[in-house]
Amino acid sequence: MANNMNETTAGVVTGPSGPKPRPILSPRNIMIYGTILVVCFYYALPLYVMIVTSLKGMPEIRLGNIFSPPVEITFQPWVKAWAEACTGLDCTGLSKGFWNSVKILIPSATLSILIASINGYALANWKFKGSEVFFTILIFGAFVPYQVVIYPIVIILRELGLFGKLPGLVLVHVIFGMPILTLLFRNYFTSLPEELFKAARVDGAGFWGIYFRIMVPMSLPIFVVALILQVTGIWNDFLFGVIYTKPENYPMTVQLNNIVNSVQGVKEYNVNMAATMLTGIVPLIIYFASGKLFVRGIAAGAVKG
Amino acid sequence: MAGATKPVRILRNLNAKIAALPMITTALVIFVGCTIWTIVHSFTNSRLLPKLEFVGFAQYERLWSTRRWLISIENLAYFGIGSLVFSLVIGFLLAALLDQKIRFENTVRTIILYPFALSFIVTGLVWQWILNPEFGIQHIVRSLGFENFVFDPLYNPDIVIFGVLIAGLWQGTGFIMVILLSGLRGIDGEIWKASRIDGIPKWKTYLFVVIPMMRPTFVTALVIITAGIIKVYDLVVAQTNGGPGIASEVPAKYVYDSMFRSQNLGQGFAASTMMLLSVLIVLIPWAYLEFGGRKNGK
């Protein structure tokens, strides 16, 4: 080590360089890391409480406190929440809501991303008269409170014969995902080098050819961001689910709320927390698996609220 | 000859126009059409079904003399001011904390931000459980020996909205932190060096130099928080369902209940138009500053 130093810095007076190293246990560090620890503890606590409550039996919940780890771990509440929990008289568990949500999620996410990416592509590369005006209206539309437009949409869906059915809800998700996704794709496509587009035009590629053979393959990261945004957004939706579907098609969030806040019967807090965890797991997995992309996605989707 | 080669105007760029049809339809039918439809119908006496029998401002007069609506507005004000102040202050403090070149920054950010991935329903239900006086925080503090300790925000009409606020802040501050942190990272490092040379304490640099420089970031955060506040609905439904009594009602819930529960469409339309109005009050100055200013100024 010493030899090495002498060789590389021969002739130069060697001294300490770079910023002064800070002692690990300085008061400043203790304060900063102490605060961070408390903050992390606070934010992590509800998740912890959810998990431990869902693993306890009811007798233990009545005796103990919500923060203590389970003495005897039981998965019974999870089984019950999934397969037996009741909404009203229907005791088939949350599994039904889960599969409804999956059935809503897949077409909604796919269609909204497909349509919005084509919109964004048209706006970025094929501007036509008035295209910017429509785009501005669309972006301002993102700020219109949903409550203002929910009723007219009920009428439109009823006229189309889609009210209360899954395709109707899919359409609603496509519509309300459009402002933010179009913005996302338009900005991304605008940032791609224009020469690429021009070269393809010279080679005779048309609107769809350029989209499918150049734009899509070059924009996979932004498609992933859009996917994360839509999957969490659609999965977490409650308002549209409760308005535009009938009880047999209720998405998971609506069914969860009906199970937990039902006034009938004895409250089973462990089953409730297991059901809550089950509903939260999907976005949590996406969150923990996607890391930085999630941050990018929500930053883009911020206006969606 | 010239006429033959010149393509018809509407057919130019036809593919792009067809591709943009969903966007055009959504913009015109949903965001313009439906909004106007609702505003127009807010002046009618629609009840079970929408109909065009105009009654002037009667729905609005009735709205503003309904106790439930007034409570909703009051709650929204408390919730809104609380959200704004605490999200910005806590969000900024956390961002500044994470900006101190700490280790494990990614881990810390992941922990603070994860609630944002959860739905309001999940958030509301978890906090309903934690704030449950029989089992939650109140029970634990009492079992530590403080027999008279009272902390039951969800069962006390006077403070129930702050119980909702606690849950809302837990869910949303992480996101505000991320936005403000990206703003902090955008500040030129030279600023810090200059203030260190001048011997200005760090907190003063933050307060008088960095925060004013981050104005655009704060405005973005402000718009995001405000848009979220006015829409607040699911959280209340899950956590309190407007209770106890009507103590934690919010405007969005008033709209939903008028339209789909009590068959009083006119009230729902009038209330939702008021919501739109409040968004515009925030949005128009922001849009003016953001877009109008750029055009005229630079």
Image (cartoon, rainbow, N blue to C red):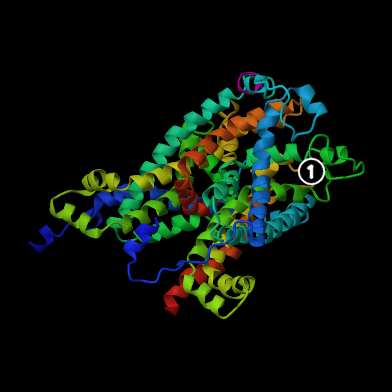
Q: What's the amino acid at mark 1?
A: Leu
Residue B197 visible at all: yes
Residue B4, percent from left and from top: 11, 58
The residue indicated by pointer 1 is: B154
- Residue at horizontal 71%, vertical 55%? B79
**Which chain letter matches label 1?**
B
Report the magenta residues as a range: A80-85
Residue B229, percent from left and from top: 64, 54
User: Quarter of the image holding residue B281?
Assistant: bottom right
- Residue at horizontal 56%, vertical 75%? B196
In this rendering, is residue A44 above or below B282?
A: above
- Residue at horizontal 21%, vertical 45%? A209
In this rendering, is residue B117 above or below A75?
A: below
Secondary structure state at the residue bearing disc 1: helix
Magenta span: helix, strand or loop, mainly? helix
Residue B43 visible at all: no
Number of numbered discs overlaid on the protein picture: 1
Question: How many C-alpha atoms fall within 10 Å of the one at disc 1: few (<14), some, or many (≥20)?
Answer: many
Left or right: residue B231 compared with residue A141: right
Residue A240, percent from left and from top: 56, 39
Which is nearer the eye, B260 or B187? B187
In this rendering, is residue B296 above or below B18?
A: below
Q: Residue furthest left?
A: B1
The C terminus of chain B sits in image quarter:
bottom left
